[in-house]
Image (spheres, rainbow, N blue to C red):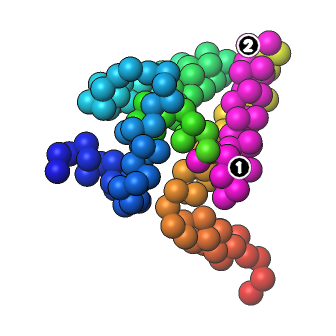
Amino acid sequence: MDALSRLHRSLAGGEDEERQEDDILGDNDDLCSLSPLQRVYAFAACLATGLALMMLSLIVFAKPIKFAVMFTFGNIMAVGSTVFVMGLNKQLRMMLDPVRVYATAIYGGCVVFALIFALLIHDKLLTLIAIICEICALFWYSLSYIPFARRIVSDLMVKLCDTEL
């Protein structure tokens, strides 16, 4: 069994062989004729570019509008990189799953608001607030992929922020 098959099985949750045409590396939505190895390379390149944009955005942190644009586009590229591995349909199904649909909507709204505040309104404070909300929404969205992570973080926050003695 090659490495790509093992990656596929671990990400797909060990699905049966009969559902293999709907699996992660096999679901290319007829939009992409890339081989599985090329898709992994495209995923890595898109993820690296997104992470690089997010890191480079810290250089212009003093200018919140430039920071917001670079950070948001880097964030979109990093999140969107998984489309190369999973395929567009599977990615959208997972994002719109009832467990994470609210986090997806809040994240998408924060991305849109950050870009509107940065590019159209040019308001630094609103841009920074939208970026902070974007980061929190992405963190909450990411926790939905880890079993019981949201519950653990929620319980921890209640214990840390509880004012009753």
The quadrant where residue 108 appears: top right
Q: What secondary structure characterizes most of the magenta part?
A: helix
**Residue 105: horizontal and vertical position, in percent?**
74, 42
The number of callouts visible is: 2
The residue stretch that appears in magenta = 94-120
Q: Is residue 64 left or right of residue 28?
A: right
**Residue at the left extreme of this rendering:** 1
> What's the residue at 30%, 48% (across, down)?
7
Identify whether 115 is placed above or below 104.
above
Outermost residue to the bottom? 165
Q: Residue at x 65, y 68 (%)?
A: 154
Q: Residue tagged by mark 1? A: 101
| Residue 75 in view | no
Residue placed furthest toward the front:
18
**Along the line of sight, the residue nearer the viewer: 32 or 104:** 32
Foreground residue among 107 and 154: 107
Q: Secondary structure at mark 2?
A: helix
Discs 2, 1 touching: Cβ within 8 Å: no
For the residue carrying disc 2, how many other residues have a C-alpha within 10 Å: few (<14), some (14-19), or many (20+)? some
Say what secondary structure mark 1 lies in. helix
Q: Is residue 161 above or below residue 23?
A: below
Identity of the residue drawn at 55% across and 40% down: 91
- Amino acid type, mark 2: Leu
Check disc 2 and report the residue beneath it. Answer: 119
- Mark linked to residue 27: none
Mark 1, Cα crowd under 10 Å, few <14 / some 14-19 / many 20+, is: some
The amino acid pointed to by label 1 is: Val
Q: Is residue 160 above or below residue 165?
A: above
